[in-house]
Amino acid sequence: MLGKLLKHEFRATGRIMLPLMGALLALALMANLSIRGMTSSLSDIPALRILFILILIFFGMGMVAVGVMALVVMVSRFYRNLLKSEGYLMFTLPVSVHELIWSKLIVSLVWFFATALFIFLILALTGLNLSGTNLEMIFSELPSWSEVVRELDELGIRGALTQLMAWSAVIMLLGAIVSCLHFYGAMALGHMFTKNKVLLSVVFFILISFAFNTMEMGYGLSGIAMEAQSFDMHTAKEGIRFASRVCMHACIMQVVQAAVLYLATALGLKRGLNLE
C-alpha cells in the first residue's frame, strides 16, 4: 500500500514541481542568451541592456523560488492531506499512520534532492556554456581515478577521507529528514487541540527548535572539546579523522532528533488528531 501512496504523492507534487523546473530551465536558457548579449554590441542599446538585466534577476529569483516551493509543497501536502478535511478520507484507508508519514517523507526527500541537483546542473551547464568549455575538455584535464587513489594512499588519508565523505552524506540525508519531521511534528502536535491549531503549530515549531538548538550546543560543544584532545591537528590525516568524529556526533544528534520528531508526529496523528 505504501507504493500506491507514493505513486499518488509523486503525481500530486509533480503537477506543481515539474512545471516549475521547466520554467526555471527556460529562464536559464534566456539568462544564458542575456549574458552573451551583455558582452556583445547589443548591450549598447539601453532597452536591451535593461531587458538582459531583468532576465538575470528573474533567473536568480527563479532558482530561489523553486527551492522554496519544494519546502512549501512538502508542508502544504502534509497539512491539507492529513490535517484538513482530506484527512477524513486518508485515515479511512487501509493503511497505517506510519505508511502515511513515510509516503510524505520519502516524496519530500526526493523532491528536495532532485531540486538541489537540478539547480546545480543548471548553474554548472550555464557556466560551461558561457566559458566555452565542454565536459570532454574538463575530464581530459582531470587525473584518472587510479592516480587519485594512489596519491591518497601516498598521503595516508584514503581511508580517513572516505569515512569523512560517508559521514557527510549521512548528515545531508539525516538533516533533510529532520527538517521534514520538524514541520510534521509541530503541525501534528498543534492539531491535537480544538482551537488555534495553526498558531499552536508555530509555537510547537519554535519550542522544538529551541530545545534542539540547546541540545546541539551542549552536546556538540562538549563532544568536540573531548574529541579534540584525542587528535593531533598538525597532520592532515588526524585533522580528517577529527572531522569524521565531529560528523559522527552530528549524526547521533540528528538521529535522536529524527526519532523524537517521528514519534511526536505518529502519536499526534494516531491518538490526538483533531480534524474538527
Image (spheres, rainbow, N blue to C red):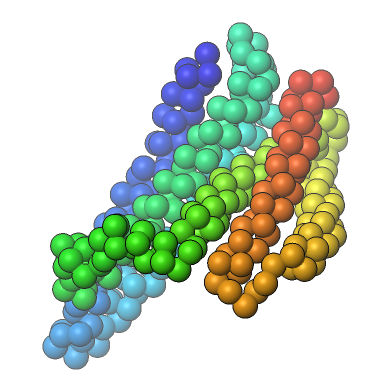
**Which residue lies at the image location 61% right of the left edge and 23% below the top edge?**
100
Is residue 163 at all visible to an observer of this figure?
yes
Count of numbered badges drawn on the protein: 0
Q: Quadrant of residue 123?
A: bottom left
Q: In which quarter of the image is residue 184?
A: top right
Left or right of 52? Residue 90 is right
**Which residue lies at the image location 53% right of the left edge and 39% below the top edge?**
108
Left or right of 15? Residue 142 is left
Q: Looking at the picture, how far across and down is residue 170, in whole percent?
A: 57, 47
Q: In this view, does 102 lie above or below 234?
A: above
Q: Looking at the picture, how far across and down is residue 52, in whole percent?
A: 27, 77
Q: Looking at the picture, how far across and down is residue 203, in whole percent?
A: 82, 49
**Which residue lies at the image location 83% right of the left edge and 24% below the top edge?**
272
Q: Is residue 72 above or below residue 188?
A: below
Give the residue at the far bottom of this rendering: 44
Q: Is residue 178 above or below residue 138?
A: above
Q: Quadrant of residue 226?
A: bottom right
Left or right of 229? Residue 42 is left
**Which residue lies at the image location 23% right of the left edge and 83% below the top edge?**
38
Is residue 30 at all visible to an observer of this figure?
no
Q: Looking at the picture, how far across and down is residue 162, in whole percent?
A: 49, 54
For the C terminus, give its image quadrant.
top right
Please tell me which residue lies in front, 240 or 212: 240
Give the residue at the far top of this rendering: 94
